[in-house]
Image (cartoon, grey):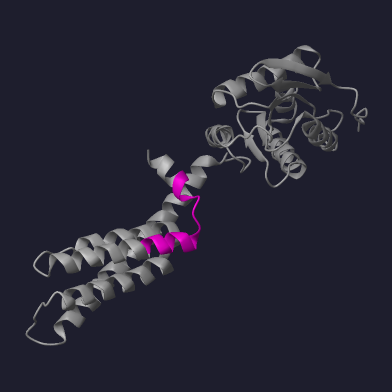
Amino acid sequence: MLARLIRFMEKYSRNEIILMAICFTAIVGIIDYATGYEVSLSVFYFGPVAFSAWYAGRRSGIMVSLLASLVWLNADLGSGHLYGHWSIPFWNSILRFSFLAFNALLMDAFHRQLESANLLARLDPLTGILNSRAFNIELEKAIDVHQQDEPFTLVYTDLDNFKQINDTYGHLEGDNKLCEVVNVLVASARSTDVVARVGGDEFALLLPKTDHRGAKVMLTKLRKHLADINLDSAKITCSLGAVTFLKPPHNSSQAMQLADKLMYASKRQGKDRVNFGIFDGEFSIKHAEHDYIPQMRRN
């Protein structure tokens, strides 16, 4: 429920968030004026302040805090509340502003800390790209917003014989090569693509608005760049499965299973190749590709 609310609020711009907070403040002020000074609604002014600070930042929170304090002051004076001295309501308003502004700063700081923690929880600690859990979330988003005329492609890749690299050169060198592979993946991808490490030497790519022809172009470039990773006489190759979704799958698990199936087909066919598939409500293998990439040079 909370995740849906956060995703819903992400659709709005900062200015729209501030406008909503101002409207909420005005509504509270109107009710405060109507109920009179004997019924305190001070706590309800905190709602729009917290809302604006959380979604639009501390400056917006402080601005709405000032507005809320002025609205409360006008509602209080307008309702006929009499004080022993003319300065008391202004003093109370200053105190309310200080309280609201302080809480706006706290909300903003807490939000930043939470975002930082969430970011760390989404990233693979070795390579710095998304982990499996975060990738599934991005894949679910792509499924939710899928449009019939905008297919997307999911790619699952497994490095070939990578265990031998770890056994021969050690795990430290293996980790270094994994990071080099990630650099190639990121360099080959577009800014809109999503790259993730979903296993030890397994990676996934989400290519929005990409059919199997566009995926073929991207994966050709990827495999050529992988061939440039220097590792004595060994070479870095990978087996890939790429599924283009013309219609959305039921969920991310089904999508990953289809791509995984194609990747293992590439393994069985001799590795160092790509199998393409199409999902339009029914799954079918489009074709396999291997020889379109030039022979990789040996060092």
Describe residue 82's horizontal placement relative to residue 4 as left or right: left
The answer to which image quadrant residue 217 occupies is top right
Which quadrant holds the N terminus?
Answer: top left
Residue 73 at x, y = what percent?
Answer: 22, 76
Residue 49 at x, y = what percent?
Answer: 33, 63
In this rendered view, identify the residue nearer to me: 125 or 95: 95
Magenta-colored span: 7-21
Above or below: residue 100 compared with residue 73: above
Q: Residue at x 57, y 35 (%)?
A: 135
Residue furthest to the top in view is 268
In this rendered view, identify the residue nearer to me: 275 or 31: 31
Q: Residue at x 25, y 63 (%)?
A: 28
Residue 239 at x, y = what percent?
Answer: 76, 23
Describe residue 115's horizontal placement relative to residue 189 as left or right: left
In this rendered view, identify the residue nearer to me: 183 or 261: 261
Residue 16 covered by magenta stretch = yes
Describe residue 246's horizontal placement relative to residue 139 as left or right: right
Q: Residue at x 61, y 24 (%)?
A: 255
In this rendered view, identify the residue nearer to me: 28 or 65: 28
Which quadrant holds the C terminus?
Answer: top right
